[in-house]
Amino acid sequence: MDNTGAANWSDAKRRVLAAYREWIRAAPEIQTMYSVPFPVSTIRTRMRQEFERHRYVNKLPVVDVLIQQNNAEYQEMMNFWKQTTHVMSYFESENFRGSDRLPRNFMQGFLEASIYGP
């Protein structure tokens, strides 16, 4: 991974695909290193969602910045510089502490407890 920007769109595409493949291949190792309580398939799906989020970026300098951010994120992840809580923050919708389980505020929790309570 070098620090120079992409020369053209085909070079940028090649770099993005290479980065995507690195992340996908690293999913089992990330699961083991950070004790992620989700299957590898869920981790890979979340990785793909992160890449898809930037799918329609149409400016080459922006793509270059995203590639550099990706490289830094990958290095931090694989060198075990992140805490498990940082990694788990990517899985908020799947997380057992996600918004589906906990009420948003006191009143919602109170009303749900009185309706579905003992």
Image (tube, rainbow, N blue to C red):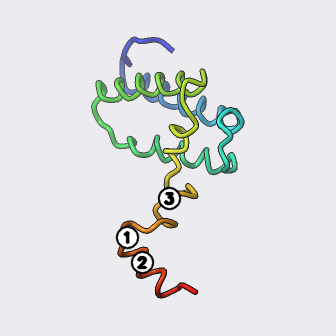
Q: Do callouts 3 and 1 mark residues in contact (Cβ within 8 Å)?
A: no
Q: Is residue 43 left or right of residue 39?
A: left
Q: Position of residue 73 (x, y in %)?
A: 48, 27
Asked if residue 8 is positioned above or below residue 115 in the image, the reply reads above
Between the residue at mark 1 and the residue at mark 2, the CA separation in whole angstroms equals: 6 Å
Q: Position of residue 114 (x, y in %)?
A: 46, 85
Instruction: Report the amino acid beneath label 2.
Output: Phe
Residues marked 1 and 2 touching at CB (< 8 Å):
yes
Looking at the rendering, which quadrant does residue 94 occupy? bottom right
Q: Quadrant of residue 8?
A: top left
Q: Which secondary structure, mark 1? A: helix
Q: In the structure shown, which secondary structural element does the residue marked by tag 3 occupy?
A: loop
Real-space Cα separation, disc 3 to disc 2, in angstroms: 18 Å
What residue sits right under mark 1 in the picture?
Answer: 106
Q: Residue at 36% across / 16% down in the picture? A: 5
3 and 2 marks in contact (CB < 8 Å) = no
First-in-chain label (3 vs 1)? 3
* Few, some or many residues within 10 Å of mark 1 (<14, 14–19, 20+): few
x and y percentages locating residue 108 in the rendered image: 38, 75
Q: Earlier in the sequence, mark 3 or mark 2?
A: 3
Residue at 58% across / 37% down in the picture? Answer: 84
Rate crowding at label 2 as few (under 14), some (14 to 19) or many (20 or more) other CA atoms within 10 Å. few
Element carrying mark 2: helix
Residue 98 is tagged as 3
- The disc labelled 3 sits on which kind of residue? Gly
Residue denoted by label 2: 110
